[in-house]
């Protein structure tokens, strides 16, 4: 007999455990971020069989060789953005739309760019269905940023960049933060760049592994 599908109650329980064991116990301290991670139904952002693994401590496949990031990485990057309810945020790499939904719980207006049209369309539909009406999905090359809505208080890049794209620095508001994994295609370091007028303070945070950022100011498509 096939195992029964987990119920919403089961998912809620798994999500609570994820927040306590994978996030709080590992040092995520911002209560608003923990609450957002408790609220967003991560299992809705992964399809079919993968839904039952949605609250595991790992990234998961979402099609087109792309992934939804590990919950800890989503929470850590979000915490580093230091969002408030009025923040204007740009995300590069919509993927499933999960990180964008977490941003939608915490910030004022969010734009998120995805280079694969199909992922962008699916994410936009789901975000709309779940009521994230202040999250706007755009299909295109995020290495160029999104000049028409700049400046942004926070920019998060959820794919590995060979170097920091100049357009993203240009589109950061004074005092704003850019969180971005920088490195080669297999290993990167997560960096936080804070804009102070025309200068940029850079901080190295931790080692990480992301799929490549592919575009004009990123890696070449393979
Ligand atoms: N934030 C996503 C989520 O919550 O599901 C996970 C993102 S996945 C690790 C990285 C995504 O970045 C992929 O969907 C990939 O197609 C996208 N990507 C790579 N290069 C890009 C670019 N230049 N512009 C926009 N999206 C890009």
Image: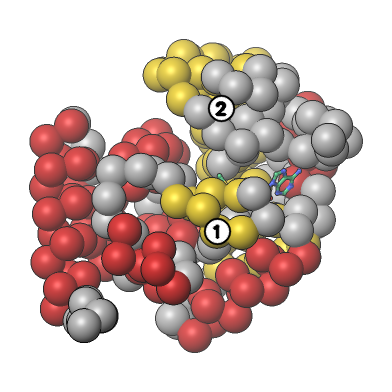
Callout 2 environment at 10 Å: few (<14), some (14 to 19), or many (20+)?
many
Name the spot of residue 52 as percent of width and height, x first: 30, 65
Q: Which numbered dot is residue 26?
A: none
Q: Element type at marker 2?
A: strand
Residue at mark 2 to residue at mark 1: CA–CA distance: 20 Å
Question: Which one is nearer the viewer's eye here, 64 or 22?
Answer: 64
Residue at left offset 60%, top offset 22%? 186
Corner quadrant of residue 149: bottom right
Q: Answer yes or no: do the residues labelled 2 and 1 have beta carbons within 8 Å?
A: no
Q: How is the image coloured?
A: secondary structure
Callout 1 environment at 10 Å: few (<14), some (14 to 19), or many (20+)?
some
Image quadrant where one finds the C terminus: top right
Q: Element type at marker 1?
A: strand
Label 2, on which residue?
Answer: 181
Name the spot of residue 4 as percent of width and height, x first: 21, 81
Label 1, on which residue?
Answer: 62
Drawn side of residue 165 relative to residue 82, left or right:
right
Asked if the beta carbon under badge 1 is closer than 8 A to the nearest atom of ligand 1, the reply is yes
- Residue 8 in view, yes or no: no
Corner quadrant of residue 111: bottom right
Question: Which one is nearer the viewer's eye here, 147 or 74?
Answer: 74
């Amino acid at each position: 007999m096939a195992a029964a599908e987990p119920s919403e109650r089961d998912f809620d329980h798994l999500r609570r455990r994820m927040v306590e064991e994978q996030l709080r116990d590992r040092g995520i301290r911002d209560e608003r971020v923990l609450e957002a991670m408790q609220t967003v139904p991560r299992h809705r952002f992964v399809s079919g069989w993968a839904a039952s693994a949605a609250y595991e401590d790992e990234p998961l496949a979402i099609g087109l060789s792309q992934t939804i990031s590990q919950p800890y990485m989503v929470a850590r990057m979000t915490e580093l953005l230091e969002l408030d309810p009025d923040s204007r945020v740009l995300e590069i790499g919509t993927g499933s739309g999960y990180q964008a939904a977490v941003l939608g719980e915490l910030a004022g207006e969010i734009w998120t760019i995805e280079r694969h049209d199909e992922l962008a369309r699916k994410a936009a539909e789901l975000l709309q269905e779940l009521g994230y009406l202040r999250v706007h999905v755009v299909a295109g090359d995020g290495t160029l940023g999104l000049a028409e809505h700049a400046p942004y208080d926070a920019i998060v890049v959820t794919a590995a960049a060979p170097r920091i794209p100049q357009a993203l620095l240009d589109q950061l508001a004074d005092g704003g933060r850019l969180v971005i994994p920088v490195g080669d295609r297999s290993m990167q370091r997560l960096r936080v760049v804070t804009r102070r007028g025309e200068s940029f303070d850079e901080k190295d945070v931790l080692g990480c592994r992301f799929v490549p950022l592919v575009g004009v100011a990123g890696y070449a498509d393979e």
